[in-house]
């Protein structure tokens, strides 16, 4: 009878040890999930901020270059407004081309970039 009690205590202690190990594992795993989520959030946020800064710089560059080209074309055609209309027409033509190619080229391209960023 004494041997059964000793074996039962041994099994109970082993079970408690296993339960404690499982509990530690689950706690560590949940912390790992939180760290991974935080890492992905930080990566996504920094990519978004960098993209916004780059986009703004590109926008300002395009604005100043467009203004300069429009001013120069206005001098060439002897009509400042004409120069600005020529540049505006160029951008309108680009807009039409992007609108036509949107579904076949632009959307898949952007989707692939976003997907790559998510899985980095």
Image (cartoon, helix red, strand yellow):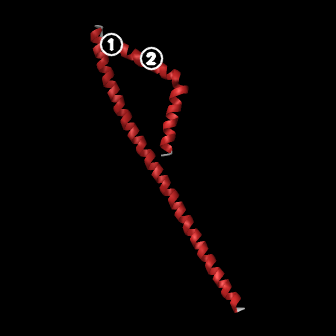
Q: Quadrant of the N terminus?
A: bottom right
Please state if 9 lies on the left or on the right of 101 as rendered: right
Residue 49: quarter of image: top left
Q: For the residue labelled by badge 2, is the local secondary structure a helix, a strand or a loop?
A: helix
Please state if 56 lies on the left or on the right of 115 as rendered: left
Look at the picture and state if 45 lies above or below 104. Answer: below
Alpha-carbon span between mark 1 and mark 2: 15 Å
Identified at 42% across, 42% down, the residue is 47
Please state if 58 lies on the left or on the right of 31 as rendered: left
- Single out the residue that lies furthest toward the right: 1
Identified at 37% across, 13% down, the residue is 86
- Single out the residue that lies furthest toward the top: 78
Q: Horizontal and vertical percent for residue 96?
A: 48, 19
Q: For the residue labelled by badge 1, is the local secondary structure a helix, a strand or a loop?
A: helix
Residue 63: quarter of image: top left
**Foreground disc of the pair 1, 2:** 2
Look at the picture and state if 21 lies above or below 105. Answer: below
Q: Which residue is mark 1?
A: 83
Identified at 52% across, 35% down, the residue is 111
């Amino acid at each position: 009878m004494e041997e059964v009690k000793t074996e039962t205590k041994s099994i109970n202690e082993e079970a408690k040890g296993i339960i404690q190990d499982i509990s530690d594992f689950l706690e560590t795993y949940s912390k790992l999930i939180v760290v991974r989520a935080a890492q992905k959030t930080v990566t996504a946020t920094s990519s978004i901020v960098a993209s916004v800064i780059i986009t703004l710089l590109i926008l300002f560059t395009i604005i100043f270059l467009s203004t300069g080209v429009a001013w120069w074309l206005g001098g060439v055609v002897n009509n400042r407004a004409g120069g600005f209309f020529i540049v505006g027409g160029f951008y309108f033509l680009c807009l039409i081309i992007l609108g036509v190619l949107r579904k076949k080229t632009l959307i898949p391209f952007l989707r692939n970039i976003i997907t790559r960023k998510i899985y980095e």
